Amino acid sequence: MRWPFFVLFFLILSCNKNNENCLFRPKPIVSINNKDISDTISLVFIGDVMGHRPVLNSFYNKEQKTYNFDYLFEEISPLIKKSDYAIANLELTLAGRPFTGYPRFSAPIELAKSCKNAGIQILTTANNHSCDRGKKGILKTINKLDKIGVRHFGTYLDKEARKKSNLVILKKKTIKIGLLNYTYGTNGLPIPEGVCVNLIDTTQMKLDIEKSKTKGLDKLVVLLHWGNEYQLKPSKKQRDLGDFLYKHGVDVIIGSHPHVIQPMEFKKNKDGLEKLTVFSLGNFISNQRKPNTDGGALVKLRFVKKNNLTKLLPPGYFLTWVNKFVEKGRNKYQIIPCLSQKPNTSIKKLNYFISSTRKRLAKNNIEVNEILD
């Protein structure tokens, strides 16, 4: 078919690179050596998964004598599944019955299964509750997570397992992101002989970081169980440890333990490299209802690799809130994104959490903004 010259001229002028229907759309650049191709990977980091007894009880079916926590994640799951990888802090053991809450947690495996169903593929296990049920608790938690196909790191069956699995590597196309996990302690409980729990020990951490540099990583993320509970600002110890880790090559620090959201700081060092510190993500699942403890943050990171250089794009976060309400005389829980308000919410508490957290983070965050869509 021959087209009149004026028709062709009009079509060419009307086309641009954003016009998907353009007959003369430029072809994408393809290069064998990948110099002109950019790869991306997205990660979402999630706060404390707690197993307080009232939460466990609310998801128990007395007739069937079973647990199912899927409803807890129903509203937040679509948001989690938008990322390539989702990582959360499992602040409990899967040690079996009797199921108990604070101070020594043991939750049913169904809670971890529902985490997986919601899109959480990876759980950190080094925290102050790792040893709540002793050696058996550590072993059972590891074995049960393996059985249901959830990756985990921070605690290990033995030294050999730690050697093989201490560094978790997340891959997508040409990008490799490494993860390490450590805790300040285990509530004074001794670490049982034979098993391993990663403690915050700068000598060992330096060795782990140096070893990670032999794995061809693009970026290294360290997840720390640190800081002071219920404090809205990081301590000097947190900042000092962060400086130490960045000095030795860490790119991102994600914190947990305080059970409240602490500031997030995205900076560039003197060499122009991006460094992100999220001091505390707060609670993802819990029965804590005091101000600032009834919610948390999901931090989303996107890494882009082009010309063999990987950069962290400006990070953002979502606020989440644990909606606790009574239905048919029974407590119910559901994690909701603060983008919307669902029926049965304690509106006053929700509004306080949103307004106070936004005000505080707007004041104290550095180049990390809330995602509202």
Image: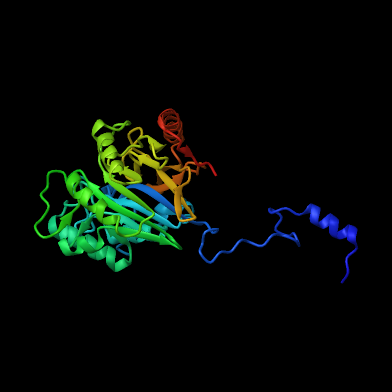
Q: Residue at x 25, y 64 (%)?
A: 144
* In this view, 138 is above or below 349: below
- Where residue 59 sits: x, y (%)? 34, 55
Q: For residue 37, which quarter of the picture? A: bottom right
Q: For residue 137, which quarter of the picture? A: bottom left
Instruction: Report the quarter where the C terminus lies.
Output: top right
Q: Is residue 237 visible?
A: yes
Taking depth in this image into account, of 351 and 132 the one nearest to the observer is 132
Q: For residue 67, which quarter of the picture? A: bottom left
- Where residue 153 sits: x, y (%)? 27, 57
- Where residue 90 sits: x, y (%)? 29, 52
Taking depth in this image into account, of 37 and 357 the one nearest to the observer is 37
Instruction: Report the quarter where the N terminus lies.
Output: bottom right
Taking depth in this image into account, of 188 and 338 the one nearest to the observer is 188
Q: Residue at x 42, y 50 (%)?
A: 44
* In this view, 113 is above or below 241: below
- Where residue 290 sits: x, y (%)? 32, 34
Tell me how many marks there are.
Answer: 0
Q: Residue at x 46, y 43 (%)?
A: 315
Q: Is residue 76 visible?
A: no
Horizontal placement of 26 versus 164: left or right? right
The coloring applied to the image is rainbow
